Amino acid sequence: MRSPLEARRDTGQQELRPWKTCAFTELTAARSRLLRMLEGLPEDALTRQHSPLMSPIVWDVAHLANYEEQWLLRALGAPALTDSSVDSLYDAFRHPRASRSQLPLLSPEQAFAYASRVRAASLEWLHQLPEDSSAPLLRGGFVFGMVAQHEQQHLETLAATLQLMTSHAYRPAALARPRPARAAQHEVFLPGGPVRLGSDAPWAYDNERPAHSVHVPDFLLDSHPVTNGDFAVFVDSGGYDDARWWDPQGFEWIHAQGIRHPLFWLPQQGGWWRRRFGWVEPLPRDEPVQHVCWYEADAYARWAGKRLPTEAEWEKAATGSDGQPRGYPWGDTAPGPAHANLGGDTWGPSPIGGYPAGQSADGIWGLLGDVWEWTSSTFDGYFGFKPFPYREYSEVFFGTEYRVLRGGAWASAPVAVRNSFRNWDYPIRRQIFAGFRCARDAR
């Protein structure tokens, strides 16, 4: 029923030069993860619309292939493998998610075969391209990094789809997560001053550019994300019924929707349980809370006498108060298993305090991985922003409708996680793997 999506090469990775090596590695890692995630799912699970918030899984598979064909083949001068009708079918802006199940989609077998064919052609084309090029798409291998990150971002979206799926019990093989003794939570003082926002690194997205400095006043930031146990106190004390803590629009929305607790929490006599993919289990009180929307995060912060950090404050915390440039909280070493819970193989957040090697220069833990962290900031371009290579990646989302998230989650891939990476979503979104930490002004 399904075709293997293998990146077949007759020559080894060692023949590729630096950015080509990286491109080969990241494209191959993304495809391997896709296969692991979807292995064994029946056709009905691949084609069904599990939620109006998400696409049918088979749409995502073919969309990944079509996006790759457009950017790694046609845009770089390689022959097209399909015609424009396929482009239209898998255009995310032309077809909202809720309507995609009504489209004449490729079957699972056809979608997997299409993705396999495109990947083989892309890797063949990769070997033929010049290492050094003045073409903007190829400078530093940007377009290959864009496609690799795009695929991994869709795999995180697929993880959210699989969590919403109830027609089949999806129980992935999950790697163990470290369970340290309960980590002490405290606030960290961060002195005011300049912070370098953004990045001009070769694979940075347009909304991260240009790198620039802004001034941030003194502030305090929680050393860890808010945990399930912390958030349960807010729930059990009637926090969802007290309008004092809520943005008025948020309070109206949660009551219209009948929301009384984070998504996938289950009230049981004697405590809280949760549904995590195919398991129902007691709620781990020492893990970061996830599946809360911005309104819920903002309400908790007010209840606790604090607030959500701005994205500038969050990036200052990740970079470090000493002003030294760092790509990650711990330095410039690419994320590894000792630094953060990333890559999707744990299928859930880890208890706080599990990654001492990943703490920041100021002793702040868990800034990358486990859960995305809501900030108070709305999404907009930095001064001097230029859309590249297409407006629809960032620019069409600029405005007050969206809130910025930072840091990446357990389902995020290392290639798409860095201090400068910016995510965004509507303040009502709860299916994403989002949590938060609190901040407050220093007085």
Image (cartoon, helix red, strand yellow):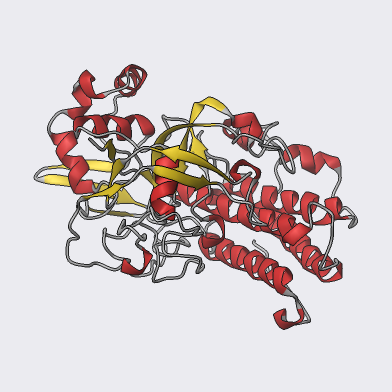
Q: Nearer the viewer, residue 282 or 262?
A: 262
Q: Report the front residue among 388 and 228.
A: 388
Q: Which of 146 and 110 is in front in this view?
A: 146
Question: Is residue 410 shown to the viewer in this render?
Answer: yes
The C terminus - image quarter: top left
**Measured from the top left, where is residue 381 in percent x and y?**
60, 34
Asked whether, in this view, residue 64 is left or right of residue 325, the answer is: right
In the shown orientation, is residue 165 left or right of residue 236?
A: right
The image quadrant where one finds the N terminus is bottom right
Q: Is 325 placed above or below 389 here?
A: below
The location of residue 318, given as percent across then percent down, is 41, 53
- Nearest the viewer among 124 and 199 is 199
Q: Residue at x 32, y 40 (%)?
A: 218
Q: Is residue 311 visible?
A: no
- From what the image shows, is residue 135 above or below residue 337? above
> Measured along the vertical axis of the image, is residue 412 above or below residue 313?
below
Q: Percent x, y for residue 89? A: 74, 38
* Picture coordinates of residue 257, whole percent (x, y): 34, 23
Residue at 78 percent across and 63 percent down: it is: 122
Query: Would you say 356 lies left or right of 383 here?
Result: left
